[in-house]
Amino acid sequence: MTASPVQPASLPLLAGHASLDEPLAWRAGQALSRQRFLQDVHRLAPLLPQGGPVLPMTADRYQFALALGAAMARGQAALMPPNHTPDTVRRLQALFPSAYVLGDAAQPQLALPTLPYPPLDAEAGAPAPMVMVPASHEAAQVLTSGSTGEPMPHGKRWGQLVVNIEAEAQRISETLGRADLRGVTIVGTVPAHHMYGFESTVLIAMLGGAAFAAERPFYARDIARVLGSVPRPRVLVTTPLHLKTLLDDGVAMPQVDLVISATAALSPQLAARAEAALGAPLMEIYGCTEAGQVATRLTTQAPEWRTYSGLVLSGDGEQSWVSGGHVPEPTRLADILEVLEPTRFRLLGRSNDLVNVAGKRSSLAHLNHHLNSIEGVRDGAFWLPPDGGGEAVVRLVALVVAPGLDRQAVLAALRERVDAAFLPRRILKVDSLPRDPTGKLPSGRLAELATRLLAESGHD
């Protein structure tokens, strides 16, 4: 096991190789310097309520970073749930009774006390001192939903986040052929409150020396507009779903220097298509909420993943663990990995993703990949009924967004791609799948939709 680096007791809020005069963010084409950010943090921190943690509810990436920085200056943490629905906020109140919301506007319907971001003076003023944060400080509570649907908190200490982002910055710089990330601008389609967006758009600027666009564009024309508003080199941080939508729209994009994708494994075909269309290499990040970022791969070059500096893997074919670097204790990974070396592996599928039909095994991720590779399928997912649908032999169900294809065309295309045992008994045509803002498809939402459609359609 690789020893974790020895850290000082306190670490700066802003790091990397950038000076305080350089941008931390760009908003509508205007630079917001790192010094300006420190000034805003010092102005906002005294206005925050006692207690905490803070729940930032904003689409503006700069305001999210500001809430995080001001909260840490007050010794508080930031809450990062998977969504901001009133039900989620109500559940957070039970877990964190002293939590409060800092939002784009007051939202009185929420269970938690709310206050809007105050207007901040844009004048430069006196230089603000660097905020020093204890390495042991719990900077964020990342929340995921377990099988019960209740939020499951995972605390992230500042020192561990610093080591993680240093490793990510090193890997991105290496891929770009640069010594560091000074002058690099990040444009993200993922929200800042998602772990991937938090690390790869917000922290990579605060701790890695890059800058980020404050906007979170979703539609292709908006992505093109935001990319065009920031200087090169530009890095587009996105997801497989967002990337596929972007490419399908066919909108001309400004020059991109690197595309980063995460949240689900990307097919080599889509990666090659993205590189051809955007004129930039594509790098995938593999990680999880428990361990943070673990590894990357250049998808069109090789199927193997390479761990970040300091991280090592161990496993027995069924279970895998990661340790070292920013992961001080061995942490089990939810995926099935083929560990080739302690720092190199292949991703085979999720341990809770395997299906067994007539003695044959496959993963839902593998089947979904083939479903979404069918020309004319905009989105799709396989679903396994919990009781096999009342049949002696389990039969899968497929939900498909494919306006120009009928069920028989989808089934015929699947026959060419997957074993007959995994062909779906029913194909349900839908207008859209209930994905979250990062493109992930929560199993509970998929099951609810499939169950309702099956009940409405009968044995279709």
Image (cartoon, rainbow, N blue to C red):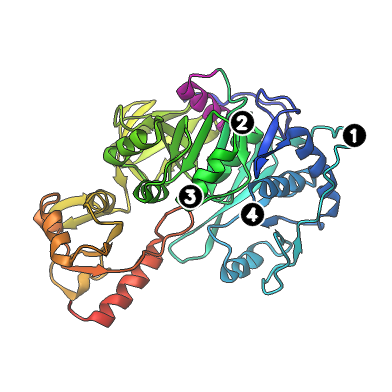
Viewer-side label of 3, 1: 3
- Residue 126 marker: 1
**Pointers 1 and 2 in contact (C-beta within 8 Å):** no
State how far apart marks 1 and 4 are (Cα).
31 Å
Pair 2/4: label in front: 2
Of mark 1 and mark 4, the one earlier in the sequence is 4
Task: Say if the magenta span includes residue 175.
Answer: yes
Disc 4 secondary structure class: strand
- Label 4: which residue? 79
> Residue sitting at 55 percent across and 28 percent down?
169
Instruction: Provide the secondary structure element on which disc 3 rests.
Output: helix
* Identity, as a three-letter code, of the amino acid under mark 1: Ala
Q: Nearer the viewer, mark 3 or mark 2?
A: 3
Give the overall secondary structure of the magenta segment. helix
Q: Nearer the viewer, residue 132 or 332?
A: 132
Amino acid on which the number 3 mark rests in the picture: Arg
Q: Does the residue at mark 2 contact the one at mark 4 (Cβ under 8 Å)?
A: no
Q: Amino acid at mark 2?
A: Ala
Residue 323 screen position, x and y as percent:
47, 32
Which amino acid type is marked by label 4?
Leu
Taking the view exactly as shown, the residue that stands out farthest to the right is 126
Residue at image position (58%, 33%) is: 185
The reply to whether dot 3 and dot 1 touch (C-beta < 8 Å) is no
Q: Residue 342 location in percent, x, y?
A: 37, 26
Marks 4 and 3, the one that precedes in the sequence: 4
Q: Earlier in the sequence, mark 3 or mark 2?
A: 2
Residue wearing tag 2: 210
Q: Secondary structure at mark 2?
A: loop
